[in-house]
Image: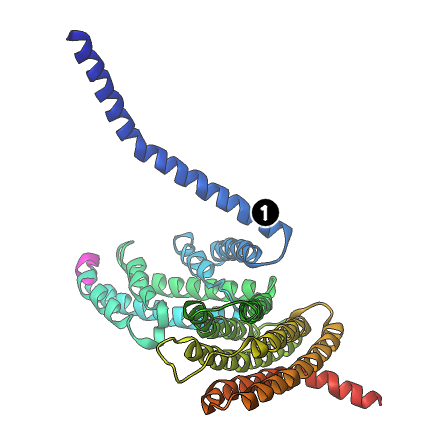
Amino acid sequence: MTGHRAATGKCMVHTQSATRSAPVRRAAHTVRAEVAWGARALRRAWRSPGRERNIVIQSGKAALAAILAWLAAAWLLPNAFALMAPWVAVVLVQSTVYRSVWQGLQQTLAITTGTVLAAALGIPFGHPVLVMIVVLPLTTLVGNWPRFGNQGIYAATAALFTLVPGQATLDSTVSRLLAALLGTAIGIAVNALVLPPSHLRSAREAVDAAVREAREVITDLADGLDEPWEYDRVSTWHERTRRLPRAINSGQSAIDWSRESLWFNPDRRRRAEAARQSDKYGEALATLEEVSDRLQGLTRTLVEAADENDEEIPRPDHAVTRPYSAFLRKVADALDAYGRSTTGDAPEAARRELREAIAEARDTQEEVRTEISRYVESTPENAHLTVFGPLMAEARRLAGALATSDAASKDSREDSSRT
């Protein structure tokens, strides 16, 4: 009995110890995972350009701006007020030069408002605590003014900087404002002159992702039409086509971000190149939007045909879906070439491939039209028109969307000029 109790006691102690150590192990595992993630991000930043490298560069620039602002303020102003300059400079190394300038103006206005309000009450009344009771609610309220943007909080913090050291004076107020202006100027200058940020790569990657998603949807649809397909599978295709606009919208947001990074960017060569590329990417997204609309119409027709509860709409025969599947594969090839003509390293070769793929798609489209006509003529039911009519129309529009794209039309114009 005694031995049993001892064993039971040891088991309970072991269980309690394990229970207490479980959170520690989970925390240790989380820390190791985060450290590993950080190490991978640093390796990516070292090996190739991208988001991680941009973050490292901007972090280094923020530190540089803070150090320069601190040194300049310590040299030009009394040491007691030097902290204001790096405090302002470090947060103004933003993702674009335009944001640095705009937020610098907003922050300066907010800091000036808070400092002046605190000084206006602190100088005549003297007692900092009593002044805080009045000034802090006021500056917090004023900080919600839309003109301040997300910089309104600096009105209240600037008031604190003015009142916490003690009696506010005119000299200390002027020194703090000068330090803030100095920090603003240095923060904006460092962001604009030291490797000014440009987000053209993110726009290119977003367009690549949108093209890849659309191509995968078309390829999956082509493969599926070669096999027996049911309502659930067709519904999945339709849902995927409905999600395509999200990828296109993400691409448009990236292009807008890229264009914003050009504003106030002093690098004229990069600015001109980025503007040209952004326009090209915007045209690509417009083409993808047209392709997305056509795919949604196509899959909607297939969903209606696959609905077993709707006996009035027939399912397309394999004699029609086989050439239609081949047509979609040619469209996927054309879309792949179109993407490479827009974002790839060899656009001229990709444009030639695009023109060839469009020509092959049109040939296959003609085969689809022939098979549909033959099938409809051999089947008296007019209900087939509700399926084959939209299928043929979407095939024509799909090929037309890529044929009228900037890359294809440019290639055609160049060939015409040579002849």
Q: Position of residue 309 (x, y in %)?
A: 35, 77
| Residue 209 lies in the magenta-colored region | no
The part of the image, by quadrant, that contains residue 19 is top left
Mark 1 secondary-structure assignment: helix
Q: Position of residue 104 (x, y in %)?
A: 44, 69
Please state, as top left, top right, bottom left or bottom right, where the C terminus lies in the image.
bottom right
Residue 219 visible in the picture: yes
155 vs 171, nearest the viewer: 155
Q: Is residue 115 above or below residue 287?
A: above
Residue sitting at 68 percent across and 68 percent down?
344
Residue sitting at 49 percent across and 42 percent down?
36
The part of the image, by quadrant, that contains residue 175 is bottom left
Q: Position of residue 256 (x, y in %)?
A: 51, 75
Residue 170 visible in the picture: no
Q: Position of residue 111 (x, y in %)?
A: 35, 67
| Residue 128 lies in the magenta-colored region | yes
217 vs 231, nearest the viewer: 231
Label 1 Cα crowd, 10 Å radius (few <14 / some 14-19 / many 20+)? few
Residue, disc 1? 43
For the record, the magenta segment spans 127-131
Q: Amino acid at mark 1?
A: Arg
